Amino acid sequence: DIDQILEVLKNNNTKITFFIVGDWVDKYPEAVKKIHEAGHEIGTHSNTHPHVNNLSYEENIKEIEESCAKIEKITAKKPTLYRAPYGEYNNTVIKSAQDKELIPIQWNLDTLDYTGLTGEEMWNRLESKIKKGDIILTHNGTKHTADSLDMLIKNIKQKGLEIVPISELIYKENYKINSNGTQTKLNE
């Protein structure tokens, strides 16, 4: 459903971040190329989508290096963002990402699209919670995400919010992260 997703994003003049698994790059290199050529940001989501909290530092590094190499081979651009599989993270996962000069990313709103929710059900999960600075988790290849994306984007924009790639949303230096995972500028 990547073609449909990219078409909806184009029609809504919206750029986003795709976190891509290395194994998916192997299966769908043309889709990765299309995402990149459409001007969307690509981050890594590991190489094989393991439970990274159970991996050693060296195994986490290998997951990151292999996935980044695959993405960079197609896009000629090294990813700068890393979203660990299953939303797992611990000090080893974070250090591994940072040592590979990647910013670890987490989401704070989950559409639960991977459970088969309809677009209306996804929007009901988001509508009362969504605010400036939120990172929303969605997936390609789910039952209703592609056919609900246009409605979700329009509803988000109707609330006066702008949708941007994550690298435009986050602080990259001089920040701290509170216990809720929210970034704030140092000296604030």
Image (tube, rainbow, N blue to C red):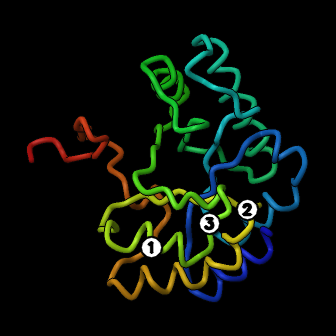
Q: Does dot 2 land on a helix, a strand or a loop?
A: loop
Which of marks 2 and 3 precedes in the sequence? 3
Residue found at the far left of this picture: 187
Q: CA distance from mark 1 to mark 3?
A: 10 Å
Foreground mark, 2 or 1? 1
Report x, y in % for residue 140: 71, 61
Q: What's the amino acid at mark 1?
A: Asn
Q: CA distance from mark 3 to mark 2?
A: 9 Å
Report x, y in % for residue 28: 88, 54
Left or right of residue 117: residue 5: right
Left or right of residue 14: residue 128: left
Q: Quadrant of residue 117?
A: bottom right
Q: Residue at x 32, y 71 (%)?
A: 128
Q: Residue at x 9, y 43 (%)?
A: 187
Q: Which mark is residue 180?
A: none
Crowd around label 1: few <14 · some 14–19 · many ≥20 (10 Å): few
Q: Which residue is mark 1?
A: 124
- Residue nearest the viewer, comparing 32 with 148: 148
Q: Quadrant of residue 160?
A: bottom left
Q: Which residue is mark 3?
A: 117
Q: What's the amino acid at mark 2?
A: Thr
Q: What's the amino acid at mark 3?
A: Leu
- Residue nearest the viewer, comparing 77 with 55: 55
Q: Residue at x 52, y 61 (%)?
A: 111
The answer to whether marks 2 and 1 mark residues whose Cβ atoms lie closer than 8 Å is no
Q: Does dot 3 land on a helix, a strand or a loop?
A: loop
Which of marks 3 and 1 precedes in the sequence? 3
Q: Does dot 1 land on a helix, a strand or a loop?
A: helix
Q: Which residue is mark 2?
A: 142
The answer to whether marks 3 and 2 mark residues whose Cβ atoms lie closer than 8 Å is no
